[in-house]
Image (cartoon, grey):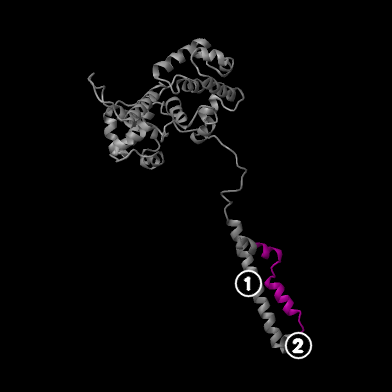
Amino acid sequence: MGEQTHSQTLSSTPPVSASASASASAALPATTRASDPASAASTSRASAAASRASAAASRLKKKEANASPDPNPAKKHRLTFSIPGQPLSAAGEVGVAIRHLRAVDPALAAVIDAHEPPVFQCPHRPFHSLVRSILYQQLAFKAAASVYSRFLALLGGEASVAPDAVLALSPHQLRQIGVSPRKASYLHDLARKYASGILSDASIVNMDDRSLAAMLTMVKGIGAWSVHMFMIFSLARPDVLPSADLGVRKGVQMLYALQDVPRPSQMDRLCERWRPYRSVGAWYMWRLIESKVPQPAPPIPALPSPDGQIMLQQQQQQSVIQMIIPF
């Protein structure tokens, strides 16, 4: 700010050249120049000051001429959708991810060696996958699969799962196949956002992760956890960490021998080394949990487990089931 003010002050007052100063000195009467030492000294000081000002102005102009333009000019803010990186469904991308994870995390390398590599392929378009995700919410796997099968039959097959077709279904029709009124409102809200152009399959595929999460959570019934699952298993996004998923958190606890299950707020720091393939790291955490889940006990009488343990086992099972659902 000081330099700008200095520049403006110099530019508002034209610099006095050395020749002009000499001319002004020469214009004085000869008797004054010779006989008045004080006047001569004052004239000499004025000439020197003018020369210094002229030199400073010259240096400032040269500096401004050589200065590079402002790399961050003021721009009108707008939301942009950048194309994400290579999806895990691309040929060879899972292999690249596994090699990276082996190199950066020796503990995870042991888990990788114990399991087959993942396959990230989804046969459905984004709209279809989101509809399927809503239908499967809060249902046991068999019950959800039954509702989904009746839903497809009502529409006329998988090829008919489109926004207009879903909007044409009344809440009563959906209720008859086992879809609750609340879920029916979720399906219609998703379909309306597609019909109005707020969402589309093309825009979803091309949105960056942050923008996609913001847009999808605007849909009724779709929260952060559902968005993470959709990104990983439907879009094959490579760097998604479902920090709130109990299965992934429990896997990280086992992997690093932590005393407690890490909180969601701790997950980013613990899994930082997995970037940019945290989706694959999360997949192996589910595998690790599955391998550690005890097999069904023999059919002998046993005391019931404490409520907390029962809840934890149910949450773990639900996490694993939900992870398999998109396939």
Residue mark closest to the camera, 2 vs 1: 1
Residue 78 falls in which quadrant of the image?
Answer: top right
Q: Is residue 11 a member of the stretch shown in magenta?
A: yes
User: On the picture, is 124 further left or further right than 76?
Assistant: left
The quadrant of the image that shows the C terminus is top left
| Magenta highlight range | 7-30
Residue 256 appears in the figure: yes
Across and down, in percent, residue 219 comes to: 54, 28
Residue 96 appears in the figure: no
Q: What separation in Å lies between label 2 and label 1 (alpha carbons)?
A: 28 Å
Q: Which numbered dot is residue 31?
A: 2
Nearer-the-camera pick, 202 or 17: 202
The quadrant of the image that shows the N terminus is bottom right
What type is the residue that disc 2 sits on?
Answer: Thr
Q: Residue at x 54, y 27 (%)?
A: 220
Magenta segment, prevailing SS (helix, strand or loop): helix
In this picture, is 43 found above or below 263? below
The first of marks 2 and 1 along the sequence is: 2
Q: How many marks?
A: 2
Q: Which numbered dot is residue 102?
A: none
Q: Residue at x 41, y 28 (%)?
A: 88
Across and down, in percent, residue 54 comes to: 65, 69
Q: Secondary structure at mark 2?
A: helix
